[in-house]
Amino acid sequence: MALQPRSEADLRDRQGRGQLRVSTALAFRQQVAAAGLEAAYAATDVVVASNAEFTDQASLVLNLGPSDPPIRIRRFQLDGVGGWGGHGSTDLVLPIGGGLVEPLRRGGAQVLTALLAGQELDLSARGDATALHPRRELDSRLDLDRIGSGRLLLHRGIVENGLVAVSSAEGLTPSPYGPLLGPYGTALYSCSGAASIGLAMPGLALLGPGSPVLVAGALGWVSGPGSGHQPQPRRLASGHARSPGAVAALTVELHGLRSEWLRACFFEGHGSALLVAIAAPVPLINLAVARQCAALDQALEAPVLDFSIPRRIRPSFGAVSYSQLLAGQIQVDGQPVACAPAHSPRLAASIAEELVSQLQEGRFPLRLPLVPLPNRPALVPLEV
Amino acid sequence: MKRRITLHFPREAVHEPITYRMAVEFDVAAKILRAQIAPNQSGTMVVELSGDIDDLAAAEQWLMAQGLGINLTPGQITINPDVCVDCGICSSLCPSGALASQAPTWQLHFDAQRCLVCEQCIPSCPLGAIALELRGP
């Protein structure tokens, strides 16, 4: 009886009665190892998986009220970082990345964390000057209280699997994951393996537009397929992706973000980025979902790519298992290469614990997707 | 190569434009890290010199000939635990293994005894959590 499939209504009913049984991905795997898959499934309703990865593929949208006389903002500088208007007349769109050529090495990531820290920032904007919006220029100051609403858009919020970056070039090669010492001196890997959202939930199958996820402490939502969404990568027999695969874009309200799980950073030679901790529930609706969720690091793998070659298709050195990555050494071309995580396992574990509490206490909605992420690949090469 | 030194200026040498002369005459770049210099007083300056090894040696000889005292500046790597997220990027570049993290906690561990103060970790940290703390003068 306990091995029967569970419906969304069953799970929400349990949550409503304060009886939802929730485990982190790590605890669930330990339970499977100790008692077996069927017993662990029978004793667990929801598994929480989490990521805390670096991303610069994000934007901050700030919605301001009208000025008097009104302005239709075309370009602006917020705390010295430039962005664009073009949505509502006083909406600001700020890229999270950038700042590479600026002396202070700041991008939208630094502006976001300054706002969350309660700072008041200088705003200067230029407008189009139309009959309805005659103001050409505007100078003011902004803090969180003066921003009516805002959203952080994570265009690659959850990626099914990560990759391993190495460099065949002499010296240090900058990358979005950190500097790589070459030739083949170091490797950095972007995904934490079995504890990550995408490898606990192959294909991001239980996420779709409107699915709730915990983003840096705030209630965020899947808005649809993310940049580079590739729902049909090569997969293992278990269904787990062998490369980055499916991608979910996320949106989250600015005022709920907590700096504890959101950090601005700057990569030499690449630019500004955010480290964002994200946790997602994996409802164990049947034994097959539980089996995929219980996959071990030795059964999962990530591709090794040469980041010193600036081409669309980078040379690949095959794949390595996450158990090798987590042990700190992989083999590339038969040579041992030391590797390190380019993500934060500590923050990922911390936000997973937070989501476990919120689910158990009924403070976080539990929903199955109305529709899945689309099957159409969004990773279409740009021909020039 | 780079070399970090502390220069002790006697009062009569304070007026000398030493960073300019090192650049022009020895092709050595001097980055001033810390300085306490005032007219007609003795002073100290911590500088990081960059240049060819022979040019550095010649520049140091010239500095001593000007009456300046030279000390190699000791320093140590420090990590701000409030900023560090234990990502491990710095540990990948640490040649001595002084920076390391491992499962299950993944908390970054720094062994100062093993540190070579090569400073490769400082620019590698995307959060700016690592710094060089100079001791003295």
Image: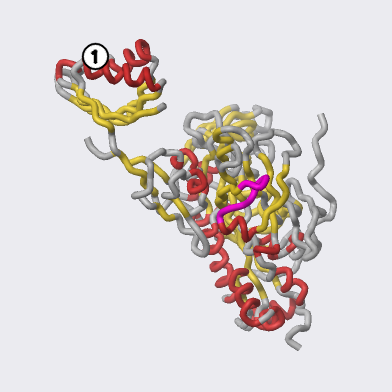
Task: Identify the residue at image location x=66%, y=79%.
Answer: A44
Residue A150, image x, y percentages: 60, 49
Q: Is residue B112 visible?
A: yes
Which residue reaches farthest top? B25
Query: The residue marked by circle 1 belongs to what chain?
Result: B
Q: Is residue A94 visible?
A: no
Residue A47, image x, y percentages: 65, 71
**A355 left or right of A10 in image:** left
Identify the residue under disc 1.
B16
Q: Tell me the quadrant of the picture where the C terminus of chain A can be found.
A: top right
The answer to whether A273 is drawn above or below residue B137 in the figure is below
Task: Identify the residue at image location x=19%, y=25%.
Answer: B43
The magenta stretch spans which residues?
A328-335
The answer to whether A289 is drawn above or below residue B59 in the figure is below
Task: Identify the residue at image location x=21%, y=15%.
Answer: B66
**B112 left or right of A30 in image:** left
Residue A87, image x, y percentages: 69, 40
Name the dominant secondary structure of the magenta segment.
strand
Residue A120, image x, y percentages: 45, 43
What amino acid type should be assigned to the residue bearing mark 1? Glu
